[in-house]
Image (cartoon, grey):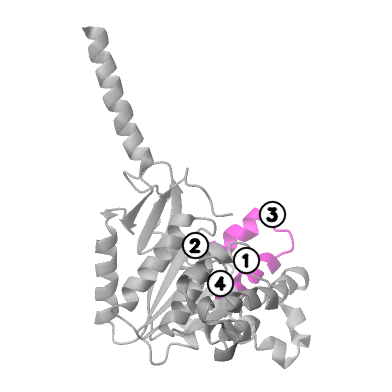
Amino acid sequence: MRRLSLLVVTCIWSSFLWAQSSDAYQWFSGEGKKRSYAQVLKSLEQQIAQHEGPTVLLFGELHDDPIAHWMQKQLTADLYAIHSKMALGAEMFERDQQWALNTYLNPPADSLPAQAKAPSMMSWGGDPAYSRLKKSINLWPNTKTDYLPLLEFAREKNIPFWACNIPRRLANQIYMKGIGSFDSLAADQKAWVAPLPFAYDSSLRCYADIFAMAGGHGGQNLPMAQASKDATMAYSISEHLNGIDLFIHYNGAYHSDYFESMVWYLKQYAPQAQIITLSTQLQDEMQQLDREEDKRRKADFILATNSSMTRTH
C-alpha cells in the first residue's frame, strides 16, 4: 500500500512539474506579477487613450523566438482595431532601404497578378512584391517567417512601415574607425544617421556592459556603434509621430530593456511621446518571473517564453 501511495504521489508531482514546464509563455507586469494577454492589451489601450500625445510602443524581441513574433502580429492587429492612427517601424530594416519597403507596401497595380494578391498565395511565397523586395535589399534570414507577416498586415491596412535602423556599414565604420571618421562622410550618407554629433553617455549600463564584455578593446568604439543604432532608431521614430496615436517599433530586447538605449534617446528626440516597453525573455517555467540579481525592472510588461521552444532560425 505504501509503495502504491508513493507511486501515486510521484505521478501527481510529475504531472504538476510537466504542466509547469509545458506552458509556452506567460505575460508578467514589470513588477513580476502574472498578467493575461487580455490584461496586457487592456492596460495598453488605456494608457494610449489617456495620453494626449503619441505613444511609442517598443516591442523588445528575441530575434529567433516564435512566440514573440506571433505575439507581435497579434498585438499589432488588436491595437489597430482600436487605434487605427498607427505607424510601424523596425530595427530589421535600415534607413537607406526605405525605398524598397515603399515599393513592397505600394506595388504598382499592373505588377501584381490577381492571384498573387490573395493572402493564401502570400503565405506560400507566391507574392511577387516580396520576391522583388528580397532581390533588392539584404533581408534578415528569418524575414519570411517572422517579419513578412507584419509587412503584409501593414500593406493590407495601409499602415506606414518605416525602416528605422542605421545602415550596418555605417555602424561598422564607427566600430572600426571611430565616430570621428564620420566627419568625411558625404551629406547623403550622414542623412541615414541620427543628427551628428548625437549624444552619448558611456556610463549608461547598456553601454558600460558592452565595454566591459569587450575587455575595453577598441575603447568606446563598440558601445558607441551600438549607441548609433539606438540613436538612429529613436530619431527615425521621432520623425514620424505627427498625426498618429501609436507607433509600434520591433527591436531586439537589448535596445529597449531597463529603459535605457532607445528609451534614453527617445526622451531627447520625442519628449512629447509616451514610451511603453515590452520585453521578451526565456525561462524554464512560467510560475514566476526570473529576475536578475539586482531586481532591476526590465520593462513595463515582459513576455516570458519557454526555453524549450523551437527557434525560428
Instruction: Name the foreground residue: 26 vs 212.
Output: 26
- Residue at the disc numbered 2: 253
Q: Are marks 4 and 3 in contact (CB under 8 Å)?
A: no
Residue 56 against residue 287 in the figure, above or below: below
Residue under the point 33% across and 56% down: 27
Q: How far apart are marks 3 and 2 (CA)?
A: 23 Å
Query: What mark, if any, has residue 286 been given in the picture?
Result: none
Mark 3 Cα within 10 Å, few/some/many (few <14, many 20+)?
few
Residue 99 against residue 67 in the figure, above or below: below
Residue 115 appearing in the image: yes
Amino acid type, residue under disc 1 in the picture: Trp
Amino acid type, residue under disc 2 in the picture: Ala
Mark 4 Cα within 10 Å, few/some/many (few <14, many 20+)?
many
- Residue at the disc numbered 1: 140
Amino acid type, residue under disc 3 in the picture: Gly
- Examine the structure image and report whether residue 219 is included in the region drawn in magenta: yes
Magenta-highlighted residues: 204-230
- Residue at the disc numbered 3: 215
Q: Distance between the residues labelled 1 and 2?
A: 17 Å
Q: How far apart are marks 4 and 1 (CA)?
A: 10 Å
Q: Which of marks 3 and 2 is in front?
A: 2
Residue under the point 57% across and 66% down: 143
Question: What element does badge 4 sit on?
Answer: strand
- Residue at the disc numbered 4: 91
The kind of secondary structure the magenta stretch mainly shows is helix
Q: Are marks 1 and 3 in contact (CB under 8 Å)?
A: no
Q: Nearer the viewer, mark 1 or mark 3?
A: 1
Question: What element does badge 2 sit on?
Answer: helix
Could you tell which of marks 4 and 1 lies nearer the N-terminus? 4
Q: How far apart are marks 2 and 4 (CA)?
A: 11 Å
- Examine the structure image and report whether residue 286 is included in the region drawn in magenta: no
In the image: residue 215, left or right of residue 255? right
